[in-house]
Image: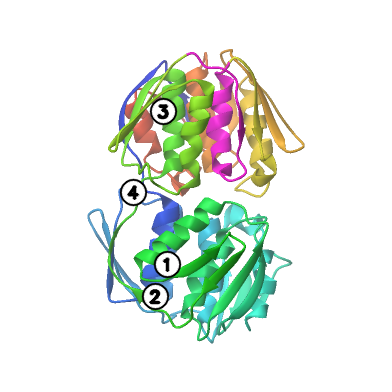
């Protein structure tokens, strides 16, 4: 799909989409719970729908009732092959989760996930008695359990998503476990995992993010849960407000452990006007100055913050760019290419993204690189552009934020499908 995006200014109030990180964790927990789990959501994206498809294939009964997802748990695989779509979290989380089964299950996916590494799962699961084979560290992967408890050593330097899956699977093992993790990145996402496990009655001990104590023979307890608002999606809205007028977002938890809540710290460094209350957060355009920010723990903020830096006078630097190399695209490279195509001065080298801002972008036609966050960044960049931005491959936004188009229009922007 090719679209044309433009906006002279933005103004309005938006309810944040549901966090796909939270929704997918609740969906996985519901599969293993006895009884009925109810998850309240504002929105469902492609990644969350993929997780629902997976648990249905693994034995859960799923129905939708308005803004609620009703799940009757029960891990009784109906098939020996499941498809996680393009979701990195779904894939890496369910690899250890299906390992509790004593039969063989193949996990596959489509699109960009086939090029994203899953090799970090192999050695740890073998330590736990699981037979696992992959295509040289990529999907498809064949898994045959059952998973046993015990000591396990894992590398967390590429992604924390597999660690999330381990922490969700090991409470179901027959014995206690200790998970030793080296170089763990995205620690806030592990906090989110532990918090949601606690909602299901599962207890995990965290010793400085390097050792996790997991008691075996625990049981997931069904319940009613509300998926919190998504700071990742809201970050684009906040940047629009900072560069183009005024945006107010509701439905976000200021006490959230989501990593991308730190977008407010970056906006403050840049000089945006921010107002916070328990029910809403607003960001208003102000004189913006260059800033430096470390995205190591919050790599998904790189695209919106790169656009923010385009509106800031002087040289801005995003540190931690190595975390962007194995996303839906090589995001360090693609955000640089995309914004350069619009007339921006941006480059990626070593471990940083360097942006020279303060001038209007010229606009033009650019590819989304099948990356939902690049597509949303380009729409956000249209607020800074002298002419409209034509985005090829825009449909990829459905991966995380299908309401983004309507929300942009509500704020005063224009998006037209041309092909």
Precedes in sequence: disc 2 or disc 3? 2
Precedes in sequence: disc 1 or disc 4? 1
Camera-near label (3 vs 1) is: 1
Q: Is residue 131 above or below residue 193?
A: below
* Cα separation between marks 3 and 4: 20 Å
In the image, the segment drawn in magenta is 287-312
Left-right relation of 375 to 127: left
For mark 1, what is the residue? Answer: 28
Left-right relation of 128 to 204: right
Front-most of 28 and 180? 180
Camera-near label (2 vs 4) is: 2
* Cα separation between marks 2 and 4: 23 Å
Front-most of 171 and 56? 171
Q: Are marks 1 and 2 in contact (CB under 8 Å)?
A: yes
Precedes in sequence: disc 3 or disc 4? 4
- The residue that appears at 58% across and 59% down in the rendered structure is 208
Q: Residue 415: which numbered mark, if any?
A: 3
For mark 2, what is the residue? Answer: 32
* Crowd rating for badge 1 (residues with CA inside 10 Å; few <14, some 14–19, many 20+): many
- The residue that appears at 35% across and 42% down in the rendered structure is 252
Please state the horizontal and vertical placement of residue 39, each as a whole percent of the image: 30, 60
Q: Is residue 247 above or below residue 332?
A: above
* Cα separation between marks 1 and 4: 17 Å
* Crowd rating for badge 2 (residues with CA inside 10 Å; few <14, some 14–19, many 20+): many
For mark 4, what is the residue? Answer: 43
Q: Is residue 154 above or below residue 357?
A: below
Secondary structure found at label 2: loop
Q: Is residue 346 above or below residue 57?
A: above
Whether the magenta-drawn stretch holds residue 167 is answered as: no
């Amino acid at each position: 799909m090719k679209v044309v995006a433009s906006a002279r200014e933005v103004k309005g109030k938006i309810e944040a989409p549901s966090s796909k990180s939270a929704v997918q964790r609740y969906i996985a927990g519901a599969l293993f719970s006895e009884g009925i789990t109810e998850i309240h959501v504002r929105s469902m994206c492609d990644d969350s729908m993929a997780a629902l498809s997976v648990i249905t294939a693994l034995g859960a009964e799923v129905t939708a009732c308005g803004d609620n997802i009703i799940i009757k748990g029960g891990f009784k695989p109906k098939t020996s092959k499941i498809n996680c779509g393009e979701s990195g979290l779904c894939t890496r989380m369910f690899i250890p989760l299906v390992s509790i089964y004593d039969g063989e299950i193949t996990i596959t996916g489509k699109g960009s996930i086939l090029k994203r590494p899953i090799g970090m799962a192999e050695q740890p699961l073998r330590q736990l008695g699981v037979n696992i084979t992959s295509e040289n560290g990529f999907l498809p992967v064949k898994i045959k359990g059952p998973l046993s408890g015990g000591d396990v050593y894992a590398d967390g330097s590429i992604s924390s998503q597999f660690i999330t899956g381990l922490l969700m699977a090991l409470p179901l093992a027959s014995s206690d476990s200790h998970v030793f993790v080296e170089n763990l990145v995205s620690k806030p996402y592990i906090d989110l995992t532990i918090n949601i496990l606690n909602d299901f009655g599962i207890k995990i001990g965290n010793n400085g993010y390097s050792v996790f104590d997991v008691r075996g023979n625990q049981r997931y307890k069904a319940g009613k849960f509300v998926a919190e608002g998504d700071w990742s999606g809201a970050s684009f809205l906040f940047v629009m407000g900072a560069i183009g007028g005024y945006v107010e977002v509701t439905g976000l938890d200021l006490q959230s452990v989501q990593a991308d809540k730190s977008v407010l710290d970056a906006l403050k460094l840049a000089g945006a006007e921010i107002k916070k209350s328990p029910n809403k957060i607003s960001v208003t355009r102000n004189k913006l100055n260059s800033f430096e920010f470390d995205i190591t723990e919050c790599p998904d903020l790189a695209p919106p913050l790169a656009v923010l830096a385009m509106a800031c006078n002087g040289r801005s630097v995003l540190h931690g760019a190595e975390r962007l190399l194995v996303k839906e695209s090589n995001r360090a490279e693609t955000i640089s290419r995309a914004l350069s195509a619009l007339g921006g001065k941006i480059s990626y080298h070593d471990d940083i993204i360097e942006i020279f801002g303060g001038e209007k972008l010229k606009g033009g036609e650019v590819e989304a690189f099948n990356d939902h966050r690049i597509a949303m960044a380009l729409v956000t960049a249209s607020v800074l552009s002298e002419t409209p931005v034509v985005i090829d491959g825009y449909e990829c936004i459905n991966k995380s934020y299908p309401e983004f188009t309507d929300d942009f229009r509500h704020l005063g922007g224009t998006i037209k499908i041309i092909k």
